[in-house]
Amino acid sequence: MPEASNGSAADIVLRPVANADLATLLALYRHLNTEDPSLDMRLAESRFAEILIHPGMTIFAAFAGAQAVSSVTLIVIPNLTRGGAPYALIENVVTHADYRQRGLAGKVIRKAIASAWEKGCYKVMLLTGSKDPATLRFYANCGFMQDKTGFQIRRPAAA
């Protein structure tokens, strides 16, 4: 893996992930939820194939060479309200620990938002479980407003 000092901003490429990017994306996701168990590779390949063909779903990533160093998932959802304008959801925002504080997450988020606007979305939503003021400021600086109340329900653990 490249050291953080080897990749300048000029060396970073933003693009949607492709089939060959699975291994580097899985390595990057270890920086998102460190306690998550590793996925069985067959399951990971199957899920990734589903993601790549899922209408309206795109994972945008910043690459330093072949290494994914920041990414965001954008899901565009068809809609029957708001004149039929779709809406979008952003999920799995992550930056490799060695590449943080370089503006990469902001760049991939802005890329995802631009894509949502290009697809006619009337809004883009993002939820975070973080209470860290710096994280909340970061999302506000990306243009998000904290003016709604979010709820979630998680599937109970199997007994």
Image: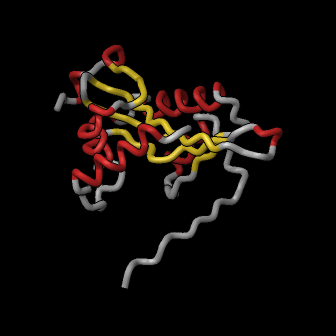
Q: Is 109 situated above or below 89?
A: above
State the colouring used for the structure image: secondary structure
Q: Quadrant of residue 143?
A: top right
Q: Is 145 situated above or below 60?
A: below
Q: Position of residue 113 (x, y in %)?
A: 59, 32
Residue in the picture at 72% in, 51% down: 147
**Left or right: 105, with 119 as reference point:** left
Q: Position of residue 15 (x, y in %)?
A: 41, 24
Residue in the picture at 31% in, 16% down: 11
Residue in the picture at 77% in, 46% down: 80
On-image quarter of the N terminus: top left
Q: Residue furthest top?
A: 10
Residue in the picture at 25% in, 30% down: 67
Q: Residue furthest bottom?
A: 159
Q: Position of residue 101 (x, y in %)?
A: 39, 34
Q: How many marks?
A: 0
Q: Is 80 situated above or below 157?
A: above
Q: Residue furthest right?
A: 83
**Left or right: 52, with 141 as reference point:** left
**Left or right: 8, with 121 as reference point:** left
On-image quarter of the C terminus: bottom left
**Left or right: 47, with 39 as reference point:** right
Q: Position of residue 145 (x, y in %)?
A: 68, 44
Considering depth in this image, is 17 or 150 the residue closer to the camera? 17
Considering depth in this image, is 4 or 1 the residue closer to the camera? 1
